[in-house]
Image (cartoon, rainbow, N blue to C red):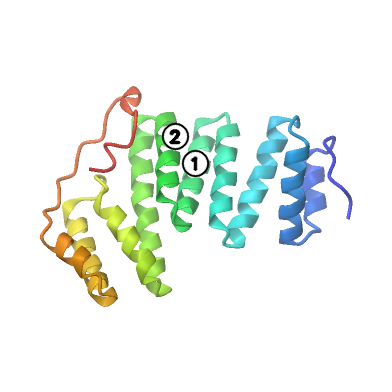
Amino acid sequence: MERLTKEMTKSEIEKEISQWGEYVQIDNLTRFLKTNPGIPIDVKRFINQKLGEVYEKRRMFFDSAISYEKVAELCVLRQEKTKNFLKSVDNYIKSGYFDRADLTAKKSLQEASSVERAEILKSLKEFYKQEAERGIKENKRSSTVKVYEKMLEMNSIPIQEKTEIKEKLLKLYLTLGMMPQYNKIKGRTLTTQKKEPEKEEEIEGLEFLYK
């Protein structure tokens, strides 16, 4: 196994790491980034992309999210930024770091046009929905509770869908014996969907995402 050097091109790095196992890739690529902070931006972006992919494949979702977020910050094209920010958001959600997902979603929204913001909000809702479905399938009730609780706070989800989520959440509360939470949510009135801001400069936080 050869050692990566800062003089290598992306294609040379790709050829070298293709011979390594996944954990060897993680170890060597991480060390390479730390010891060579001055490498070209495109190489740095490429390596973080590779790390994101390997981490995701190994279900190391938090580390994958961090890598994809770094890729997005190194991208020049807005579409590429958005794509990688959303990959980061998805993996933060999968790892249970909803606050980090919010912060990364905010970055993505700040970079987006009004049309792109609508797609980002749609993707955000789908990520949480998919995570809830995964939790049910894998019998991770406690994790699914947290996802449903988060979804009830999202203004991008219509009332009809929130009502369905509320019923699923109530059933999980009963199953887990979480009666204080059950009683609190059972009598709660769901809020109407708020209109998303039209101007990019109005996005200062995520207040329009959550009530």
Q: Residues within 10 Å of mark 1 (few under 14, many from 20)?
A: many
Q: Position of residue 52 (x, y in %)?
A: 61, 50
Q: Residues within 10 Å of mark 2 (few under 14, many from 20)?
A: many
Q: Position of residue 14 (x, y in %)?
A: 77, 48
Quarter of the image for the N terminus: give it.
Answer: bottom right
Give the residue displayed 38% in from the left and 48% down from the top.
123
Secondary element at image label 1: helix
Looking at the picture, which amino acid does disc 2 mark?
Lys
The residue that label 2 is drawn on is 107
C-alpha gap between disc 2 and disc 1: 8 Å
Quarter of the image for the C terminus: give it.
Answer: top left
Give the residue displayed 36% in from the left and 63% down from the top.
132
Residue 23, by quadrant, is bottom right
Give the residue displayed 45% in from the left and 45% down from the top.
100
Say if 146 sits above or below 156 in the image. below
Secondary element at image label 2: helix
Say if 150 sits above or below 106 in the image. below
Q: Nearer the N terminus, badge 2 or badge 1?
A: 1
Residue 18, by quadrant, is bottom right
Q: Position of residue 172 (x, y in %)?
A: 27, 71
In the rendered image, the residue lying farthest to the front is: 180
The residue that label 1 is drawn on is 85
The reply to whether the C-beta atoms of the residues labelled 2 and 1 are less than 8 Å apart is yes
* Left or right of 102, for residue 207: left
* Left or right of 42, for residue 28: right
Q: Position of residue 27 (x, y in %)?
A: 74, 53
Give the residue displayed 53% in from the left and 42% down from the top.
84
